[in-house]
Image (tube, grey):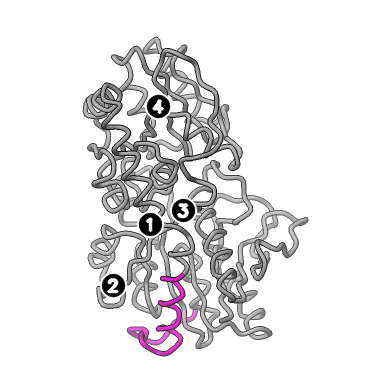
């Protein structure tokens, strides 16, 4: 098949860990490569954020193409909505010259552009995050455009099929008004050739347990909960990786650690090169991921694939991936997290059992080869007319 992925803000080649560069970037890049490995012709479309960007191979059979929409400079994703009509025009021009068999839009703005440009080409939608969930947890701090939730409801009705990444998202989509029979679950995947129990391990000091938090440094990731949790765990060092050491959230976390007298045990190290992440994960006794909410959560899955025990909040995709193979705690509850950490760190046999179960689940169910197979099966059903939009596709 000719498969086009649309990822308006999440450039697959962007450095991971910035404010708008995380799981979606990894997902799109890995899915494109895995689909191409199955013999498909894959094109990924993302917005041009630099004049120097040119079409770039992602993998044999998969290419990244940049779309002119707005100024060719980096913009925050919440500022991109006004540029989606131009994005759609450029997509329509490309699809008139090379018509894909199926389009897979990632994130709500990609869905708007794809449905506008599709001209009968079936569109599959993955939201990666829903505006209603973001608004529920962030309140007035939510910087999403005012029409986001209504747009997501419209996209859910007009796309041929919505691919949810976890069970919790199906419930959220139902509340949004998307018929459950037009939603399929295909989770995010993990690169099991890179993330696995064997391999190099980053050096660490002797005499302390190591707890790792890695990912984008934004308040909703709840890293401050971890800092508060280790106040009474004197044998624990915390590595906080992601973003830049001078980011606002990094400075806040460093200040918080200092206020608690933890500067010698809590290190905010900034972004870690993707190739070095598995070794850093393997060096940890526990990986902690405690966001307030999480549409899926790729970091816990990568840690599981490395055979490292995970403590995560009981939200979103963690309810599918970590449940039964790790420890779930409530969000924003440092006391509960401290108890879970103490229990795991004091029982190495339990950590080893969790690590074994985790690696088995990650490698057996979430490898990208398996995820690509499941995604391809959905595409084939959509192309064959198995699913149809609830109403005719709209135009912006």
For the residues labelled 1 and 2, the Cα–Cα distance comes to 30 Å
Considering only vertical position in the picture, is 80 above or below 326?
A: below
Q: Are marks 3 and 4 in contact (CB under 8 Å)?
A: no
Q: Earlier in the sequence, mark 1 or mark 3?
A: 3
State the SS at label 3. loop
Span of residues in magenta: 373-396
Of residues 68 and 226, the one drawn nearer to the viewer in this rendering: 226
Residue annotated with mark 2: 178
- How crowded pointer 1 is (Cα within 10 Å; few <14, some 14-19, many 20+) is rated as few
**Residue 139 visible from this viewpoint:** no
Select label 2 or label 4 by which is in front: 4
Q: Earlier in the sequence, mark 2 or mark 3?
A: 2
What residue is drawn where x is 43% and y is 64%? 371
Residue annotated with mark 3: 190
For the residues labelled 2 and 3, the Cα–Cα distance comes to 28 Å
For the residues labelled 3 and 4, the Cα–Cα distance comes to 21 Å
* Quadrant including the N terminus: bottom right
Select label 1 or label 3 by which is in front: 1
């Amino acid at each position: 098949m000719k498969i086009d992925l649309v990822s308006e803000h999440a450039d697959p080649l962007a450095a991971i860990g910035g404010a708008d560069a995380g799981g979606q970037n990894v997902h799109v890049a890995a899915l494109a490569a895995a689909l191409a490995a199955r013999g498909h012709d894959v094109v990924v479309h993302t917005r041009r954020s630099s004049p120097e960007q040119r079409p770039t191979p992602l993998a044999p059979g998969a290419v990244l193409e940049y779309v002119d929409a707005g100024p060719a400079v980096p913009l925050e994703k919440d500022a991109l909505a006004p540029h989606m009509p131009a994005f759609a025009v450029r997509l329509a021009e490309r699809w008139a010259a090379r018509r894909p068999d199926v389009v897979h839009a990632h994130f709500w703005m990609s869905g708007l552009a794809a449905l506008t440009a599709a001209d009968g080409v079936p569109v599959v939608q993955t939201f990666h995050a829903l505006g209603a969930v973001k608004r529920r947890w962030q309140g007035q701090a939510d910087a999403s455009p005012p029409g986001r939730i209504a747009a997501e409801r419209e996209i859910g009705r007009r796309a041929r099929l919505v691919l949810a990444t976890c069970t919790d998202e199906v419930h959220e989509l139902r509340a949004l008004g998307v018929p459950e029979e037009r939603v399929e679950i295909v989770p995010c995947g993990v690169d099991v050739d890179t993330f696995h129990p064997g391999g190099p391990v980053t050096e660490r000091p002797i005499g302390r347990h190591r707890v790792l938090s890695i990912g984008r440094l934004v308040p909703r990731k709840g890293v401050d909960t971890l800092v508060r949790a280790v106040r009474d765990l004197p044998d624990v060092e915390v590595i906080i990786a992601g973003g830049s050491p001078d980011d606002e959230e990094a400075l806040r976390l460093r200040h918080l650690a200092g206020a608690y007298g933890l500067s010698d045990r809590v290190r905010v190290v900034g972004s870690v090169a993707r190739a070095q992440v598995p070794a850093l994960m393997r060096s940890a006794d526990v990986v902690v991921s405690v966001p307030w909410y999480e549409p899926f959560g790729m970091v816990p899955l990568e840690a599981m694939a490395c055979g490292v025990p995970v403590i995560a909040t009981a939200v979103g995709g963690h309810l599918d991936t970590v449940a039964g193979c790790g420890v779930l705690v409530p969000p924003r509850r440092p006391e509960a997290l401290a108890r879970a950490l103490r229990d795991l760190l004091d029982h190495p046999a339990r950590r080893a059992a969790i690590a074994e179960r985790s690696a088995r689940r990650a490698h057996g169910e979430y490898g990208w080869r398996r995820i690509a197979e499941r995604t391809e099966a959905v595409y084939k059903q959509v192309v064959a007319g198995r699913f149809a939009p609830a109403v005719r596709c709209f135009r912006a």
